Image (spheres, rainbow, N blue to C red):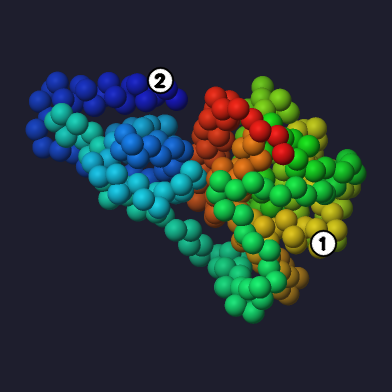
Amino acid sequence: MMLRGALLLAAIAFSFCTGLQAAQTYAARGLVLKIDKAHRSVTVSCEEIPKYMEAMVMSFRVKNSKELDGLGVGTMIEFTLVVAEKSAYVEGIRVRQYQAIEQDPLAARRLKLISGIVDSEGAPKEIETGERVPDFKLVDQNGRSVTLWQYSGKVVVLTFTYTHCVLPNFCFRNSNNFRLLQKRFSNRMGKDLILMTITFDPVHDTPDVLAIYGKTWSADSNNWKLLTGNPADISAVAERFGMSYWFDEGLMNHSLHTVIIDRNGRMAAKLEGNEYSADELGDVVLTVLEHTETHNVHHP
């Protein structure tokens, strides 16, 4: 990725040397990896810009630090890349809100709003970015008890699914993203990185069912935990991360959330929706891995 970034900078420099006069603008989008207001820059896992650059991680300068307001790690953004004669920067940064056309997440969002009005006092507080994630105890595909805090000192990537989801762009995509994460970080799995997939249909998704599901995705059961448990325990964990789900005519309506927890047990990022690629998710994970490697780890 550093090489690709260097190639892009070389291409920009070549444009300067060949006498580029008018600024060139390019519509771009990507996933935020790092914000540096002091230096007015944002690092983005940027998607391909047709006829200009391939997908890569790049640090972009902004002219006004206010452009960075409201951004966080894992935020999907759209912006304009401006390549002028003697500078390159981004402007017009817009947070890309997740808006699905499929029924499930839209319905889940409406239910969450309604339930929040009806039972706003009874629901547990949703975890915010930077806050410590409370411990929980569930059961993995091998029938063993698993807690979050037993992986203190490692980065944990956590998502929710149910094994008989029929929509290919939802649970299927989340599982495939995790399969690709497992492959990309194969030398760090277990040592630095743990994956957790929590079912929100524990009545159907028993450990035996999850074990079969795990084989479908080549999940290493030591480092990719497929978790089930008591419905009340599942519900408590899901609510902490803002996850909504319910049955409707035999199908499960649900929202989409993937959470990255740093080595200190704090929520480093929460990605909503399904519009990011496995590469972009992996770039966020790498950023969290590298960031916490340079800081002291405080165990719970």
Residue 109 visible (yes or no): yes
- Circle nearer the viewer, 1 or 2: 1
| Residue shown at the point (11%, 37%) measured from the top left | 22
Query: Are discs 1 and 2 less than 8 Å apart at CB?
Result: no
Q: Distance between the residues labelled 1 and 2?
A: 47 Å
Q: In which quarter of the image is the N terminus?
A: top left
Q: Is residue 64 above or below residue 234?
A: above
SS state under label 2: helix
SS state under label 1: helix
What amino acid type is highlighted by mark number 1? Pro
Q: State the residue in front, 49 or 68.
A: 68
Q: In which quarter of the image is residue 14?
A: top left
| Residue shown at the point (72%, 39%) measured from the top left | 300
Q: Quadrant of residue 144?
A: top right
Q: Residues within 10 Å of mark 1 (few under 14, many from 20)?
A: few
Percent across and percent down for residue 43 are: 40, 36
Residue carrying label 1: 231
Q: In this view, does 141 lie to the left or right of 298?
A: right
Percent across and percent down for residue 137 are: 82, 48
- Residue 176 - label: none
Residue 27 visible (yes or no): no
Percent across and percent down for residue 214 are: 78, 41
What amino acid type is highlighted by mark number 2? Leu
Total labels: the figure holds 2
| Residue shown at the point (82%, 49%) measured from the top left | 138
Q: In this view, does 76 lie to the left or right of 207?
A: left
Residue carrying label 2: 3
Q: In this view, does 82 lie above or below 186?
A: below
Q: How crowded is mark 2: few (under 14 residues within 10 Å), some or many (20 or more)?
A: few
| Residue shown at the point (29%, 44%) measured from the top left | 65
